[in-house]
């Protein structure tokens, strides 16, 4: 399936709008192709490809609106979907929170589409996996992995003439290698917009090293430890901050950013002053769409700056009600870091634990963002600046807010894939004191 | 993935767009389209035969064809507002073949003529041939007799799709109003309704037409103390069920009264939300638990999730073998433990069984997605591990020659694979009520409803929260607790099981959106139990200050 170019998307959206008889109409269009290859026990288990394209129409009469979508793009279908949205709008109750569609906006330029990724074929996919399998089979390890690539675009237009278009590509690769006797396990994951940056061989070497290094793990008493979190481990904890930046929840008193009396923590220092968390759709390492699904411009914005909460995300309705700028939720998230390498951080650690991956992260208390979960696929004891031996996995109970108050050091940010959401971020490795491990697990 | 994760992923709280983008949910349609009949069964047979013949002529040794129409309706509200009404329909055909000992799969959207299904079959053959080069061991498919032309319908009394949307909106807005009047500051409520119309045909000679219904009324209420800035929530005590709208028509016999009312085959949403609003407020001033060892009395509305995570998942054979190693993980319940015939999964009282037949359960169907008649089988018998959950290409590994019938795909466009059957804890054989059970507990906690949950990738170490916690002191309920979570190890936990109430208390809980696989597929599964006591479990206090 060919992806629609900007001009083609524009003309299709104009056609959809030409059918509209509603007071206001907003049309979103997405299209793309996903391909994947999955393997386990050193052989391919499934592989597939899927194309999707969907037009979604939101029609409104006064404060009544209806939404309909369709995946066929011929003229009759496009007219049908507009009529259907209008019928649903007429049936709907008035929505007191309805906000009129946006005027045309100015967007930043962000390059997130790479031919190297767009041109991946089943053969290229198989080749990338074959190279990885070759590497893991040298050590007679059992490999299970998944490679998934995407190329696509999103576009929108509304009855006030706003038009937006953004093409993007992405590839995620993940691999678990285990010893045949099940006593060692290592993991690696990589995510890029540009497939030419993915080196499955060097990634596989990391998983193999962790797998072999994790054999013979010893039990340490649970308790509070200094930990070094590799970015893959840190990001799944930080994600709960990133997804709880909503201003309405904070104003309503049901967020970690809420304060007694209906106030919020904006302007307050909540974590160590070395912590800065921001979004920037134009970052070349982590490009993202420069507009949000309702057409708002995505700009560079600090959420937490030097430890202080600077901004929250708003729906347009809530921003209007509060009389503030309607900052959209983030399209990408970056945590600033330092220059130290992971090795430097290990060297400077007297006694601590290197955590390379965390698993099954769940919220325990939304008020404090307390999370639970476990270490997995490579956890190591550090003594006098050196990795001494592997340790058995721990369950932790920790809040990322408390954790970022106990910050010792930050390393150089790198692009990582969340093992919980598969979203990509730029996150530094970090050293944290008094991280709470609450029990031991026998899992390898 | 639980419901709350799903709501976040699918963007249900913000709009339908992400939902419409997910192929599994199909395209949005007008509500009345959900009542239109799908493709006639005679036409489905012709479409299936075209695919079966095409695959055979290209060299397939086995073929199955799934023609699916998936209808979904979600009604989503908060306080006095309807946030969204989502109606989706997805129709298409998936063809799976074995060629040269290797699986191949292809799917086609909106297939209404024989050429389209034959072409999909040919594509599946081509993929199987391409993949055969990487094959190490040819597929060993357990034999399965054909059933001819048969059908199965969920025994529902009221099709949820026939109920006008206005009636559903009115129900949720009444529920929300009751929550606000009884002390809640905020309330979100949702009705999820699903109808799967599935046709399965295979080269074994089966032509199976099935009509499956599922329903889930849910809510979360939030209470806030403006002085302290603390907030507490309480979610529904309903279960997602393999039922129609009849789940919302309650008979007095469906209610289990006690410290709070719990529900069996009928759910009184208004009554539950009224109690929930009061509970959320009560939680604000409840006593924070003192960490330590307690005897736990676990209600079925809570225990289902512990069964799901610590029994259902580790006894999936594909996990045991390593097929899920890169994502969901492997299992501690390795083949050597099963072969030993003396692996002590739990105490003598513990009997855990899998089944796909229980009326009203989410997993109940006549046949699974590879044409195997559904049944019930033991997993843990008198405390000992005796079996796994396996499908046609796996059962030879555990020495069986017939599949257990737990193969499922979440869409016509997804490849079917091994999914959890309903896995349940058998009720106690000796008459025992919840009141009698509590009377014997000296220092304990009674937990109702599911909350936070997490378990390691081999299913040893877990931690669970809940919705409602009551302290038990010397056989009496002493009041509400908060900040409770318990941690244990699967084998240790099931061996600490000392008492199970009898079948008068047996109820189902379940998951509407259980995730597995890469790319992830969702499945719905129920877990039954009666209230059960576990002795000396480690309870932690989860209160923190930030």
Image (tube, rainbow, N blue to C red):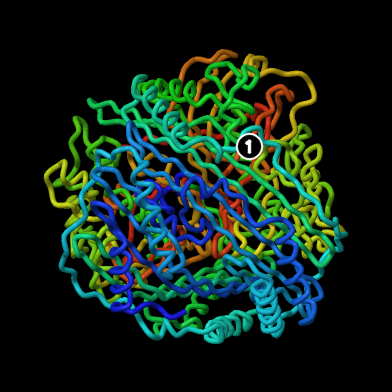
Nearer to us in this view, A162 or A219: A162
| A257 horizontally vs B482: left or right | left
Q: Residue at x 54, y 74 (%)?
A: A49
Nearer to us in this view, A302 or B93: B93
Q: Dividing the picture into quarters, in which one does residue A306 lie?
A: bottom left
| B59 horizontally vs A407: left or right | right
Count up the numbered dots. Answer: 1
| B380 horizontally vs B539: left or right | right
Nearer to us in this view, A139 or A245: A245
Q: Position of residue B243 (x, y in %)?
A: 63, 37
Q: Position of residue A53 (x, y in %)?
A: 44, 68
Q: Position of residue B162 (x, y in %)?
A: 56, 38
Q: Position of residue B157 (x, y in %)?
A: 66, 32
Image height of B77 relative to B185, above or below: below
Q: Which residue of the protein is positioned furthest toward the left in this rendering?
A: A323
Q: Dividing the picture into quarters, in which one does residue B290 lie?
A: top left
Can residue B267 be seen?
yes
Task: State the quadrant of the C terminus of chain B.
Answer: top left
Can residue B297 be seen?
no
For the residue labelled by badge 1, is the local secondary structure a helix, a strand or a loop? Answer: loop
Q: Dot 1: few (<14), some (14–19), or many (≥20) neighbours within 10 Å?
A: many
Nearer to us in this view, B131 or A336: B131
| B484 horizontally vs B495: left or right | left
Chain of the residue under label 1? B
Q: Residue at x 76, y 27 (%)?
A: B428
Q: Residue at x 62, y 61 (%)?
A: B412
Residue carrying label 1: B243
């Amino acid at each position: 399936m060919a992806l629609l170019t900007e001009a083609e998307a524009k003309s299709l959206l104009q056609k959809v709008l030409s059918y509209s008889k509603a007071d206001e109409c907003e049309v979103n269009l997405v299209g793309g192709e996903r391909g994947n290859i999955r393997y386990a026990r050193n052989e391919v288990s499934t592989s597939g490809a899927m194309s999707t394209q969907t037009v979604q129409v939101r029609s409104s009469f006064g404060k009544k609106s209806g939404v309909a979508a369709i995946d066929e793009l011929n003229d009759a279908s496009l007219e049908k979907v507009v009529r259907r949205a209008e019928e649903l709008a007429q049936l709907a109750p008035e929505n007191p929170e309805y906000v009129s569609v946006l005027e045309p906006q100015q967007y930043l330029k962000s390059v997130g589409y790479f031919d190297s990724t767009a041109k991946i074929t089943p053969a290229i996919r198989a080749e990338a996996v074959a190279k990885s399998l070759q590497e893991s089979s040298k050590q007679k390890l059992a490999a299970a992995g998944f490679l998934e690539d995407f190329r696509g675009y999103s576009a929108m237009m509304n009855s006030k003439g706003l038009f937006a278009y953004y093409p993007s590509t992405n590839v995620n690769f993940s691999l678990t290698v285990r010893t045949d006797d099940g006593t060692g396990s290592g993991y690696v994951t990589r995510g890029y917009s540009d497939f030419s940056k993915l080196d499955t061989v060097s990634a596989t070497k990391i998983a193999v090293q962790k797998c072999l290094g994790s054999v013979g793990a010893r039990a340490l008493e649970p308790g509070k430890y200094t930990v070094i979190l590799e970015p893959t481990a840190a990001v799944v904890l930080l994600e709960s901050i990133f997804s709880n930046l909503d201003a309405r929840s904070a104003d309503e008193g049901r967020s970690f950013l809420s304060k007694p009396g209906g106030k919020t923590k904006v302007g307050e220092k909540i974590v160590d002053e070395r912590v800065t968390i921001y979004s920037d759709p134009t970052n070349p390492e982590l490009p993202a769409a420069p507009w949000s699904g309702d057409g708002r411009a995505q700009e560079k914005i600090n959420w937490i700056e030097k430890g202080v909460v600077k901004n929250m995300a708003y729906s347009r309705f809530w921003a209007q009600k509060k009389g503030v700028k309607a900052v959209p939720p983030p399209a990408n998230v970056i945590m600033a870091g330092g220059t130290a390498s992971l090795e430097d951080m290990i060297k400077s650690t007297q006694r601590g634990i290197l955590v390379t991956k965390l698993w099954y992260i769940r919220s325990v208390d939304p008020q404090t963002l307390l999370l639970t979960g476990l270490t997995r696929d490579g956890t190591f004891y550090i003594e006098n600046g050196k990795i001494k031996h592997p340790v058995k996995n721990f369950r932790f109970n920790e809040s990322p807010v408390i954790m970022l108050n106990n910050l010792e050091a930050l390393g150089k940010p790198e692009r990582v894939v969340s093992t919980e959401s598969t979203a990509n971020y730029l996150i530094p490795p970090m050293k944290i004191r008094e991280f709470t491990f609450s029990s031991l697990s026998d899992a390898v | 993935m639980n419901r709350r994760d799903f709501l976040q992923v699918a963007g249900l709280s913000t709009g339908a767009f992400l939902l419409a983008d997910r192929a599994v949910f199909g395209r949005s349609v007008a509500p009345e389209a959900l009542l239109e009949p799908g493709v006639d069964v005679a036409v489905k047979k012709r479409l299936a035969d075209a695919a079966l013949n095409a695959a055979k002529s290209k060299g397939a040794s086995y073929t199955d064809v799934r023609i699916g129409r998936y209808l979904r309706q979600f009604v989503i509200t908060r306080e006095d507002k309807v946030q969204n009404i989502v109606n989706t329909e997805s129709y298409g055909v998936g063809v799976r073949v074995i060629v040269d000992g290797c699986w191949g799969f292809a799917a086609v959207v909106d297939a209404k003529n024989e050429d389209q299904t034959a072409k999909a079959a040919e594509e599946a053959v081509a993929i199987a041939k391409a993949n055969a080069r990487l094959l190490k061991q040819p597929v060993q498919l357990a034999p399965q007799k054909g059933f001819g032309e048969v059908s199965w319908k969920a025994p529902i009394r009221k099709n949820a799709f026939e109920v006008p949307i206005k009636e559903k909106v009115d129900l949720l807005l009444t529920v929300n109003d009751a929550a606000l009047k009884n002390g809640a500051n905020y309330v979100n409520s949702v009705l999820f309704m699903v109808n799967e119309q599935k046709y399965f045909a295979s080269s074994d000679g089966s032509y199976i037409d099935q009509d499956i219904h599922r329903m889930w009324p849910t809510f979360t209420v939030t209470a806030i103390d403006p002085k302290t800035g603390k907030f507490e929530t309480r979610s529904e005590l309903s279960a997602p069920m393999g039922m129609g709208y009849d789940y919302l028509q309650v008979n007095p016999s469906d209610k289990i009264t006690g410290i709070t009312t719990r529900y069996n085959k009928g759910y009184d949403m208004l009554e539950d939300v009224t109690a929930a609003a009061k509970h959320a407020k009560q939680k604000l001033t409840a006593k924070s638990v003192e960490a330590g060892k307690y005897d736990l009395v676990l209600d079925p509305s809570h225990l289902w999730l512990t069964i799901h995570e610590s029994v259902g998942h580790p006894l999936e054979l594909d996990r045991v073998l390593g097929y899920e190693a890169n994502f969901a993980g492997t299992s501690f319940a390795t083949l050597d433990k099963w072969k030993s015939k003396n692996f002590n999964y739990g105490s003598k009282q513990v009997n855990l069984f899998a089944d796909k037949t229980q009326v009203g359960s989410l997993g109940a169907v006549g046949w699974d997605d590879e044409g195997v008649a559904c049944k019930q089988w033991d997993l843990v018998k008198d405390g000992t591990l005796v079996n796994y959950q396996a499908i046609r290409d796996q059962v030879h590994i555990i020495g069986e020659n017939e599949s257990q019938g737990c193969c499922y795909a979440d869409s016509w466009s997804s490849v079917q694979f091994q999914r959890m059957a309903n896995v349940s804890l058998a009720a106690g054989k000796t008459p025992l009520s919840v009141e009698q059970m509590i009377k014997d507990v000296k220092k304990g906690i009674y937990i109702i409803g599911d909350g936070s949950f997490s378990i390691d990738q081999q299913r040893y170490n877990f931690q669970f929260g809940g919705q409602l916690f009551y302290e038990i002191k010397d056989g009496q309920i002493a009041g509400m607790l908060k900040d409770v979570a318990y941690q244990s190890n699967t084998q240790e936990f099931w061996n600490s099981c000392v008492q199970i109430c009898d079948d008068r208390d047996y109820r189902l809980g379940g998951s509407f959106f259980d995730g597995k696989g890469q790319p992830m597929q969702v499945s719905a599964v129920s877990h039954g139990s009666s209230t059960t006591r576990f002795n000396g479990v480690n309870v932690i206090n989860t209160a923190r200050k930030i």
